[in-house]
Amino acid sequence: MRTYHVLTTLMLIALAACQSKNSHTDQVDSTRKALDETYKPLAPDTAAMRKYTKVEMVTDLGRIEMVLFDATPKHRDNFLKLVRTRYYEGTLFHRIIKEFMVQGGDPESKGSKPGAMLGQGGPGYTLDAEISDTLYHFKGALAAARQGDEVNPERKSSGSQFYIVSGKPVNTAEMKEVLKQKAFMRFMQDPENISYQMRYQVATQRQDGAALQDLQSELEKKIGPMVETDYQKIPQRVKQIYATWGGSPFLDKDYTIFGFVTKGYDVLEAMQTAETGEGDRPVKDIRILSVKVLP
């Protein structure tokens, strides 16, 4: 799910290495900031979602009930079309990353050999993105998989592959770290800031730690205000749900969310215990036995 530009990733690693030299006092302060806000437990209102189209998915591990949002009609209608033509029957949950997401919908997973690499299959078309500012990657969110921005700048969705979020609770410090990474990538992808990438390349080639630290200081000053602004824009209720219910906020506003799990969280949790191998594929197949639209 997560696709990074190689250079951006290397810069994040390098800057993180610089930050690891912070004093013990800084670490303590960071821990205190993580505890600044105390939230009462709050979960998404799945009861209110019952007005939407309901779908039942039966897997080897049990039954999952989901709703499909009207706010994303292209994805809703496409999913319903595939359900009604029994497209998903026999496909696998071919990728599972604990406390992040479970992914399925690849037609090439039907009858695939153990250990085969999966995730490239589909119906032969993509869907225009329907990314919403008001839908979040809380645990239980149903969203469309897609190729990364470097080959898919329009963020078009796979025609059939989907994922269900299984993220963990995210405290204030972790949320700000997520926003920091997103702000960093946004900053570095701006053509006006290409000089920072060039400086990083030169400093890395010369193994110039001092230059990397100077670069870190400059970036902190530029990105810091962006992070605070982004954090303040997040509704308090959303912060509370992420902090107590959980999710994967790094994916917000980058992928199309088109539904939500209303029943079957025990099945989602059971998937998290699956042993996985190369490509995060479960060693023991987890099949979708049937999918149907509920009245």
Image (cartoon, rainbow, N blue to C red):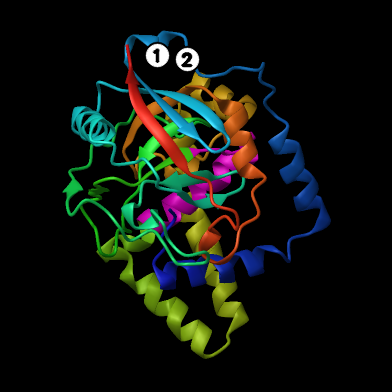
Q: Position of residue 217 (x, y in %)?
A: 55, 63
> Label 1: few (<14), some or many (≥20) within 10 Å?
some
Percent across and percent down for residue 44 are 50, 19
Report the Cα–Cα distance between label 2 and label 1.
5 Å
To which residue does mark 2 refer?
A: 46
* CB contact under 8 Å: marks 2 and 1: yes
Q: On the picture, is 156 further left or further right than 230?
A: left
* Up/down of 257 relative to 255, above or below: above
Residue drawn at the location 43% of the way across and 53% of the way down:
1
Residue drawn at x 70%, y 37% is 33
Between 32 and 158, the one lying in front of the other is: 158
Highlighted range, magenta: 165-186
Provide the residue designation for mark 1.
Answer: 49
Residue 285, magenta (yes or no) = no
Magenta highlight on residue 176: yes
Name the residue nearer the viewer: 98 or 235: 98
Q: Secondary structure at mark 2?
A: loop
**In the picture, residue 35 is in which quadrant?**
top right
Q: Identify the amino acid type marked 1.
A: Met
